[in-house]
Amino acid sequence: MDIPVIDVPASDAPSPRGTPPVGDASVAGNGGIARLSLPSQILAVFALAVVVVVACVHLGMVFLHVAPPNTITKQHGRAVDAWIYPEFEQNWKLFAPNPLQQNIAVEARAEVYTADGGVRTTGWYDLSALDGQAIEGNLLPSHTQQNQLRRALDFYVASHDEKNRSTGLRGDLSEQYLRRVVVMRLEREDAPGRGGTVERVQVRSRTTPVPPPEWSEEKVPDRPLIRELPWWTVTEDDRTGEGT
């Protein structure tokens, strides 16, 4: 006896045991935000919106920073500079025909009020060397570990003349930033000692030229150039990192 064969559409075919049919609502709801509870979905959407807004603001600030002077930068230039400098500064040193050929070390010392009411001045701390030791053997050191101290000094030097006089609107900001970085590093090294307080700090840079290759006829000084900055009084905001 012949058994009739009935064609069953693919969408109506039975699914393997334990596998829900294609197009089942339970599958559609198994991915992404849809799996979260309503409060979690709202929180996720809010977090995503914040990220998008911050990204748009950052791109806008970078655009205004690199754009030619215009009405917006004339009116809100300080706000743009405060956002950009020093972490997001745009420059062309990487592509310069004659890139930097110097080793620059940042050193600092502190005037400390001791727990017994005395005053002492610490020796010079080679902060650049300490940074180098901290990332030695680290295959993926962070941008902050590598560049925060150097960029803070670059920011200061770019906004002051050789007599440490501010040359623009960013002078106070650059001094404050460098001072706070130095205070943070000195306290990390326990410069004030037990019960002590850092009251003033002084920074100096030691610039040593990198010797040119043997085939080069370029002449460079064989002695390091030392630049000492003035003593700065440390504020409570410098210690807490607030008020920036």
Image: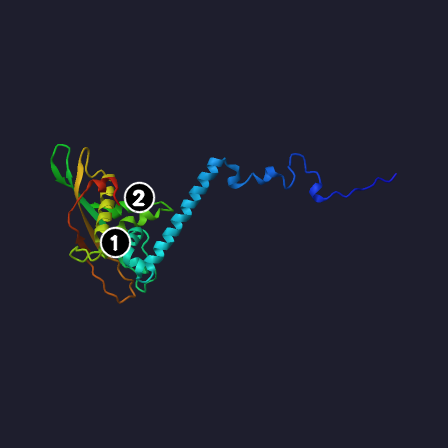
Q: Which residue is mark 1?
A: 155
Residue 189: x %, y % from top left: 24, 40
Q: 10 Å neighbourhood of mark 1: few (<14), some, or many (≥20)?
A: many
Query: Mark 1: which amino acid?
Result: Phe
Q: In the rendered view, would you say 70 is above or below 172?
A: below
Task: Tell me the quarter of the image containing the N terminus.
Answer: top right
Q: In the rendered view, would you say 144 is above or below 64?
A: above
Quarter assignment of residue 93: bottom left
Residue 190: x %, y % from top left: 22, 38
Tell whether 179 sits left or right of 39: left
Q: In the rendered view, would you say 135 is above or below 76?
A: above
Of tags 2 and 1, the one toward the viewer is: 1
Which residue is at a point 26% across and 50% down the rendered structure image?
Answer: 152
Residue 28 seen in the current view: yes
Residue 214: x %, y % from top left: 28, 63
Nearer to us in this view, 101 or 82: 82
Task: Tell me the quarter of the image containing the C terminus.
Answer: top left
Quarter assignment of residue 48: top left
Which residue is at a point 30% across and 43% down the rendered structure image?
Answer: 134
Nearer to us in this view, 58 or 148: 58
**Disc sitting over residue 169 in the figure:** none
User: Do tag 2 and tag 1 residues touch (Cβ < 8 Å)?
Assistant: no
Residue 102: x %, y % from top left: 26, 57
Badge 2 or badge 1: first in the primary sequence: 2
Colouring: rainbow
Which residue is at a point 32% across and 47% down the rendered structure image?
Answer: 144
**Disc sitting over residue 134 in the figure:** 2
- Mark 2 and mark 1: Cα distance apart in space: 23 Å
Looking at this view, name the residue that lies furthest to the left.
Answer: 118
Quarter assignment of residue 120: top left
Q: Secondary structure at mark 1?
A: helix
Tell whether 47 sits left or right of 204: right
